[in-house]
Image (tube, grey):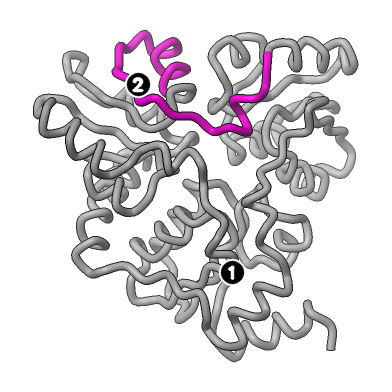
Amino acid sequence: MDIIQEIAELKAARNAVIMAHNYTLPEVQDIADFSGDSLELARIAADCQAKVIVLCGVRFMAETAKILSPDSIVLHPAPESGCPMADMADPADVRKFRENNPDTLLIAYVNTTAATKSEVDICCTSGNAEKIVASLPAGQKVMFLPDANLGGNLVKKLDRPMELWNGCCPIHNRITPDDIRQARQDHPGAVVMVHPECRVEVTALADEALSTGGMLKFVADSPASEFVVGTEIGIIHRMKKENPDKKFYPLENNPVCEDMKKITLDKIASVLRDLSCQVQLDEWAIAKARKPIEKMLELSK
């Protein structure tokens, strides 16, 4: 029996669903029941009735699935796959900031640990951050954490002052203005898309700054036939599948998140066999961290 057939049989026996982020390996995306960005996966998890959820992504995504679907068994096939950005917002530091700034609203990017989410007021993703920040009263003081690049892009686009935590996605932060200029030189007819986790000076040179879900929709709706993709290269697999007549070019520095690539078919089969690598969160932690996520989902409808 090949691994794909085994996963299908195990999935049926366990009443399981497989959710995969757009940055995971192509073969993982291909066997998933649902693929998406952080917002899409959060919405799916919130409505999920499956007994078992296999979350193919980094650790904070598996925690978010457990928070939103606490009655399900959530399996994370690569528990060692973390997110460096999430680790840049220590919950103790966030708690201390709140104590020292009681009149400041804390907005946390979903790329944070469950413990950090439990210390903030609202969560957001790259797909709904603009809508959420724009909905706040003009005079409200805001701390945006942990991604200073995403926050900085929002400050510029909305002309809205916010304090910014000192954090970033190392993968997107490595993308430079020269990378964008080189891409335009190499592919002069292509639309240049970048992720809003890129630096402000990078997004300023792109045609579009979009979440991965936003990129997929933009590509599908666009009359253009060529696109430079300024984000983690895993998304290009899905773009090609959904748009076979269009061309996609990664940036020359080939941004790769090694943590996302730790999820493999063998690991998925393994956790389905013995229900190992279960995400465990205390009930009180789930209840506390759920509030800012639910607020996010409410504001992003």
Q: In the rendered structure, which amino acid carries the disc numbered 2?
A: Leu
Quick check: is 146 in the magenta stretch?
A: no
Query: Could you tell me which residue is drawn at 47 percent across and 77 percent down?
Result: 50
Point out which mark residue 164 bears. 2
Closest to the observer: 214 or 198?
A: 198
Side of 168 relative to 295 (left or right): right
In this view, the residue in front, 17 or 57, is 57
Q: Quadrant of the C terminus?
A: top left
Q: What residue sits right under mark 1 in the picture?
A: 77
Q: Secondary structure at mark 2?
A: strand
Q: Position of residue 109 (x, y in %)?
A: 39, 37
> Which amino acid, mark 1?
Pro
User: Would you say the residues marked 1 and 2 are in contact, meaning their CB atoms lie under 8 Å apart?
Assistant: no
Q: Residue at x 54, y 13 (%)?
A: 200
Q: Please report the bounds of the magenta region as a residue range.
A: 151-176
92 left or right of 16 in image:
left
Q: Secondary structure at mark 1?
A: loop
Disc 2 packing (10 Å; few <14; some 14–19; many ≥20): some
In magenta segment, residue 164: yes
Mark-to-mark CA distance, 1 and 2: 33 Å
Of the residues under marks 1 and 2, which one precedes in the sequence? 1
Q: Quadrant of residue 14?
A: bottom right
